[in-house]
Image (spheres, coloured by chain):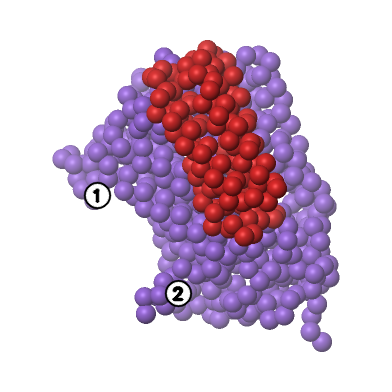
């Protein structure tokens, strides 16, 4: 548990640094709210899925959580394919993509440890929390 | 049979992993040192063909070309910091000392520990491959955009180097998670926080800084890699922000200095106490000072960026915080001196190396004040004064500190004594030559010699510095040659060295209570700790 906490704190710094870079560029006007470019529907759906996933995991439904997680990743890929060229594209692909890799690892971890998710459920809640922060930064 | 061989090579024993890190680091130390010698050749004899290896390395005339020179100093810096000092000081020393000195059987996550080494080895291989790229990495060790973008530094060598840094960062992170956790959960009975050897405090705080700030470097490297390879535009001058990279780099880069020096401080605290025959002066003060430095180290990075137009408020704040960091450093320094004061000093090889570290650290620390203060930094920043300053800390102090640690723990690591005569000759010559080489850099920097130029003395106003540069280069060549003594002594002692007993130095910390080298899982029975790390008696309960 100590090890996992240290890892998550450390890994959070990586997300902080990436988000800081994106936020600094946004503050300089290099890019703006991406909801205007991609539309709000798909990002809202993705966010709803990840919240639902975290909620059902909280209630002990590991497989359902993994299913919602897989849905989340699918929607994220759909958004990424459709995003038009422009300065915001770099930011969106980097942040969503890097987060998506972690989500994929989480889904596999949850499926592998269906019976006793333990550490994986801590990891998955962290992934969900990270997405809420990133979604706010990217789309709003 | 295959599985057996693999099990023997891929060990999860922290002592084996420590030795693997040590060999990998020492080899790259030689590579990085050789690159430095080539640079010094160019500064002494610009455009003249390099003896012996010239035609092999640089083609036709055997002279170093401007492009080759640029990749020399880039690779020298990156190799020394990430692939030589880090594995020796943190990979080898951390892995070896932490479980033994806190009385644990091994690290908390032995397999993660092994993974850390193999990931590190992979990163070293990527570095070696990148040296043979169409164009080797050549954007300087700081890799600032726009120079480090595809326009400024074409070719895949720079991208491969970014990948290597990312990999080695992940390896460091795996190590740091292990070190932090192990010290928290695996201390022996009676080993309270205020009984930890200072070496462990240094290594533990280093691990915390690594865990917090290496991810920031990883982010900077990812974005730079994206710009070069995937066509993103984070640091492009037109649509992104090149200065943003500098912020990310130095948020990591300044703590990195402390990542490398904190273990040395810890080692100095313990070794000076052992060889002065008395407990470290104001142990708690040293611990609090190291913690204070750890906290402050994340708040001072702006002093690397005074010239970027930070603005007066930010500049002054960073200046104040930077100068404030000398307060805890002085507490540590005075404690070392007070430990020496009135002690029964034994001038062993590790002790002489510690005293040498005190000298170069003082010189490096005091010149840091010139660069922490904005007014003097503006004048000195682009001169080799900066190179002299950070080499006194990052090269001389960490190198001598590592040598002190290696010669101190050599008997415990390998069960043999390291030869004293050769060791002492090497130690004294190395200290004198380090002070000479880097001291002269301070001098020519103060005279205005610019850094990073292919031939800085081409400009007529610096022409009279040629003699000084030649002398410095010859000191550096001698310094390089003297390291042969170390290599000879190392291998001779491994092969023919006198057998070391469990406690050849009469030291008082836990690792000396077990056999040399220690058996698998370290201690015959779980040790119990009864006192502080520096005596008067040993920390462990002696058998009746």
Find the distance from the CA under tag 1 to the CA under tag 2.
38 Å
Which percent across, then down, holds residue B315?
65, 19
Q: Taking the image as drawn, is residue A85 in sight?
A: yes
Could you say which is closer to the camera, residue B169 or residue B408?
Answer: B169
Chain A colour as displayed: red
Quadrant the C terminus of chain B occupies: bottom right
For disc 2, the chain is B
The answer to whether residue B481 is left or right of residue B331 is left
- Which residue sits at x=42%, y=56%? B121
The answer to whether residue B401 is left or right of residue B234 is right
Could you say which is closer to the camera, residue B215 or residue A131?
Answer: A131
Could you say which is closer to the camera, residue A82 or residue B295?
Answer: A82
- Which residue sits at x=30%, y=37%? B156
Q: Residues within 10 Å of mark 2 (few under 14, many from 20)?
A: few
Which percent across, then down, holds residue B487?
43, 64
Q: Earlier in the sequence, mark 1 or mark 2?
A: 2
According to the image, label 1 marks what residue? Answer: B53
- Which residue sits at x=42%, y=50%? B123
Q: Secondary structure at mark 1?
A: loop
User: Residue at the bottom extreme?
Assistant: B544
The answer to whether residue B153 is left or right of residue B429 is left
According to the image, label 2 marks what residue? Answer: B8
Q: Secondary structure at mark 2?
A: helix
Q: Are marks 1 and 2 on the same chain?
A: yes
Quadrant the N terminus of chain B occupies: bottom left
Q: Any idea which chain is the purple one in this picture?
A: B
User: Residue at the left extreme?
Assistant: B60
């Amino acid at each position: 548990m100590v090890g996992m906490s240290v890892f998550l704190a450390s890994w959070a710094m990586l997300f902080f640094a990436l988000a800081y870079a994106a936020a600094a560029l946004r503050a300089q006007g290099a890019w703006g709210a991406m909801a205007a470019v991609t539309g709000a529907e798909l990002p809202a759906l993705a966010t709803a899925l990840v919240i639902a996933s975290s909620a059902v995991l909280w209630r002990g439904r590991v497989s359902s959580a993994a299913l919602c997680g897989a849905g989340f990743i699918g929607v994220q890929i759909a958004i990424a394919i459709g995003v038009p060229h422009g300065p915001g594209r770099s930011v969106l692909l980097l942040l969503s993509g890097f987060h998506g890799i972690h989500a994929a690892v989480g889904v596999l971890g949850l499926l592998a440890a269906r019976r006793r998710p333990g550490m994986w459920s801590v990891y998955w809640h962290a992934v969900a929390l990270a997405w809420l922060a990133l979604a706010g930064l990217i789309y709003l | 049979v295959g599985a057996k061989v693999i099990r023997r090579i891929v060990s999860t024993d922290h002592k084996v992993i420590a030795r693997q890190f040590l060999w990998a680091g020492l080899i790259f130390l030689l590579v990085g040192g050789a690159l430095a010698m080539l640079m010094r050749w160019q500064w002494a004899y610009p455009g003249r063909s390099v003896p012996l290896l010239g035609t092999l390395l640089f083609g036709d005339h055997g002279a170093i070309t401007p492009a080759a020179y640029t990749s020399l100093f880039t690779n020298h810096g990156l190799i020394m910091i990430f692939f030589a000092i880090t594995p020796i000081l943190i990979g080898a020393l951390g892995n070896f000392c932490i479980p033994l000195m806190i009385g644990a059987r091994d690290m908390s996550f032995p397999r993660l520990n092994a993974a850390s080494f193999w990931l590190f080895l992979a990163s070293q291989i990527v570095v070696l491959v990148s040296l043979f790229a169409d164009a080797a990495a050549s954007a300087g060790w700081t890799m600032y955009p726009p120079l480090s973008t595809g326009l400024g530094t074409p070719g895949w060598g720079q991208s491969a180097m970014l990948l290597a840094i990312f990999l080695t960062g992940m390896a460091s992170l795996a190590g740091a998670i292990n070190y932090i956790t192990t010290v928290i959960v695996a201390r022996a009975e009676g080993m309270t926080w205020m009984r930890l050897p200072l070496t462990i405090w240094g290594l533990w705080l280093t691990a915390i800084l690594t865990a917090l700030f290496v991810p920031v470097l990883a982010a900077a490297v990812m974005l730079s890699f994206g710009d070069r390879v995937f066509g993103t535009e984070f640091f492009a001058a037109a649509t992104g922000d090149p200065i943003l990279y500098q912020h990310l780099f130095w948020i990591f880069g300044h703590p990195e200095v402390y990542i490398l020096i904190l273990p040395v401080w810890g080692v100095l605290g313990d070794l000076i106490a052992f060889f002065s025959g008395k407990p470290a002066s104001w142990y708690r003060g040293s611990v609090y000072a190291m913690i204070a430095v750890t906290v402050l180290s994340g708040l001072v990075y702006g002093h690397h960026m005074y010239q970027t137009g930070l603005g007066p408020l930010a500049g002054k704040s960073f200046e104040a915080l930077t100068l404030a960091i000398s307060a805890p450093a002085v507490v540590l320094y005075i404690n070392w001196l007070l430990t020496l004061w009135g002690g029964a000093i034994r001038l062993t090889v590790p002790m002489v190396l510690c005293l040498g570290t005190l000298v170069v650290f003082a010189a490096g620390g005091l010149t840091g004040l010139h660069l922490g203060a904005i007014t003097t930094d503006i004048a000195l920043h682009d001169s080799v004064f900066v190179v002299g300053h950070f080499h006194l800390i990052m090269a001389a102090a960490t190198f001598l500190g590592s040598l002190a640690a290696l010669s101190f723990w050599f008997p415990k690591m390998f069960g043999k004594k390291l030869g004293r005569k050769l060791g002492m000759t090497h130690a004294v010559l190395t200290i004198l030559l380090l002070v000479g080489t880097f001291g002269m850099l301070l001098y020519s920097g103060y005279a205005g010699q610019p850094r990073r130029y292919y031939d800085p003395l081409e400009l007529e106003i610096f022409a009279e510095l040629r003699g000084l540069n030649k002398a410095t280069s010859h000191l550096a060549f001698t310094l390089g040659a003297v390291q042969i003594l170390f290599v000879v002594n190392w291998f001779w002692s491994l092969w023919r060295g006198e057998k070391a007993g469990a406690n050849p130095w009469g030291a008082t910390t836990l690792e000396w209570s077990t056999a040399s080298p220690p058996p698998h899982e370290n201690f015959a029975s779980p040790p119990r700790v009864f006192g502080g790390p520096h005596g008067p008696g040993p920390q462990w309960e002696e058998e009746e």
